[in-house]
Every structure is written in structure tokens, then in C-alpha cells.
Image: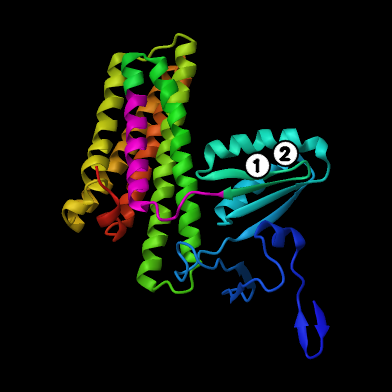
Amino acid sequence: MQGIGGSIYVALPKEWLRRFNLDKGSAVEVSLESDGSLRIAPIREGGEGAGEEKKHLSEIEIFVERPGDVYTSLLTAYLRGFDMITLRFSTSAIEREVKSVIDSAKDLLLGLEAVEIESSYIVLRVLASEDMEMDSMVRNMHKTVRSMYLDALNSLKQNDVELAKAVVLRDRDVNKLYFYLTRTIRRKIQTVSLDPKTLLKLVDMRMLIKFIEEIGDEAKNAASALIEAFSKNLKIDENYATQIEDAVNRVDEIYKNVVMKAHEKSIEISELRQHMKTCLNVRDSMRSLRIKLAEEGRDYYWFLEFIKSFESIAMSVYDILSLMPFEIISTMIYE
């Protein structure tokens, strides 16, 4: 800052001025943020959208000394809601390695694209629109994780290693939706004008998608355990496989007809409690089966891991039920 007369002036970075084609006399908008910071954004005169409410681009610069730090820094900036992320390199020698990390991140972070690349820096922007329907994305997460745990079960029944591998690959799609929804929810929560009812909906949704993501993780773990078992030509007795199938079907019945269809009817507290009790019973029965198999002393290790994952899935469904009645379920979840 510099004092001139009775005023204080702030110099704007030349690179920022060039990027937005600004010069002396250009119009900018200065707004006060909730944390006391000032946001300066260019005003586009004329053209489509002129006069409408403007969407500000929040920016961050990250100085990269070690390529190994790029992925974590990029993910953090994405989840914090930054629209423009500039990665600056200490030396041009690490540019290639950084680009490799960025390519991996782009596969996971929805809408992230490189818009400017130089030997000393890379500028990335999140191009995905927040106007994308959040309810549709939550619905897709629900349907995908259900297909994952059911296909993990089918892989066990059919001794199908390729089906198990497909389940593992599907987890990446769930994570991509999870990260984008987390980013969007956090940005909305930062909006000063949120009323308490809307804020509660967003908090409930944040918890909901976390539980869904955990179901996907456990389905992936179950499938990974089967891949290891199949690679060692291990099999589980058909009687045990049937017990597992019966337990999974009990939880799936709740997930499919209660969680994913809660918008169709209200749920009585007594019914909700019964569903939660069923989840606990399934967890206990799976745990008992796992202990029984361990005591047999046979080579059941990977099947024990498979069963343990479904114990966790039962508890994640229980956790979702514990949020109810929550208002978002009536508008967000469909089969």
C-alpha cells in the first residue's frame, strides 16, 4: 500500500491485469467478504450477461518446490472452492513431473482443466458449473455405490474376478462426485445470506454424501479382497456364501426401499427404529460369521476382509438412517 494525499492506494499485479485485459480506466468491482478481506473482480461491459449478478473467480497461487506436494495442495485448493489455481515452479526442471500429477488430479476432480501453461507456472480453472443439479449427483452416487456392493456380492457367488475388478474401478467415479459435491457445499455454506433452514440442509447433505462415499469405499475393499482370494484359487463354502448373501440382501432392502425412496412416503419413527435395528443385527451376524471362520483355522483371511467390509456397509446405512427424518432426503434421493 502507498499513501498519496489523504488516500491509500494498492498496486494490482501486472500479470492479473494482463490476464483480464485491464488497463488504466478499466472498471473493477470491489466487495467486502465475510472474513474482512476485499475481493477485486473485473467488470465485463456489454455482451451477454451484462447487468446480471456476477460470479466472482476466487484465485490462489501455490509455489511448488517439490512435485510430491502438488496433489495434496491441488486437492485442498479445489475443496476450498477456488476457481483459479496457479502453480508456480521453483525451477523449470520439475514442470514435466508436475504435469503428470496434474493429469492424475484431473481424472479425479470434476471440471478441473489447465487453461494456461508456461515453463514457470501452470494455471488451472474449475470449469464445472455449480448450476449442475446437486440432487442428480447425489442420486448418481447412491445408484453407483449400490451397484458396487451388489456386484461385489455377485462376484463372490459367481467366482468372477473381472466383476470384482470392475467394482474397484467404479470407486473412482464415486470419489469424483464426492469431491465435487463437497466443494460445492462448502462454497454455498460460505455464502453470508444463507438462512438457517438452508444451512441445515447443506450440513445434512454433507454428512449424507460422506456416508455414501464410505459405502463405496467398503464395496471397493470387499472387491479387492476377492481379487486377492481368487488369485490364490481360494474358495468359501457355499453355506457361508449363502449366509453372507442373506445378510447383504437384508441391508439392501432397507437401502433400496427406505433410503432411496424416502421421498415417496413419510417414515414412522417405529419403522425407522426397526430398520436401524436390522442394520445392527446384520452387523452382528456378519461379525459372528467372521469370528467363526477365523476359528476354523482355514485359509479364509481374504474372505474375512470381505465380510468385514459388509459389516461396515451395514453401519453406514445405519448412519444414513440416523439422519432421518432429514429434509434433503425428500428432494435429493430417487431410485
Residue 15 location, x and y as percent?
74, 58
Q: Secondary structure at mark 1?
A: helix
Residue 274 location, x and y as percent?
21, 48
Q: Residues within 10 Å of mark 1 (few under 14, many from 20)?
A: some
Residue at figure coordinates x 68%, y 36% from the top left: 99
- Vertical side of 86 occupied by 285: above or below: above
- Vertical side of 54 occupied by 76: above or below: above
Say the numbered circle drawn on residue 141. Answer: none
Amino acid type, label 1: Tyr
Residue at which label 2 appears: 68
Residue at figure coordinates x 45%, y 64% from the top left: 49
Position of the C terminus, as image quadrant, is top left
Q: Is residue 294 visible?
A: no
Residue 179 location, x and y as percent?
50, 47
Residues at marks 1 and 2, CA–CA distance in whole angstroms: 7 Å
Is residue 142 one of those drawn in magenta?
yes
Residue 24 or residue 207, whichever sits in front: 24
| Residues tagged 1 and 2 counted as in contact (Cβ below 8 A) | yes
Residue at which label 1 appears: 71
Residue pushed farthest top? Answer: 233
Residue 237 or residue 189, whichever sits in front: 189
Residue 334 or residue 125, whichever sits in front: 125
Numbered range of the magenta stretch = 126-153
Quarter location, residue 152: top left
Q: Is residue 88 visible?
A: yes
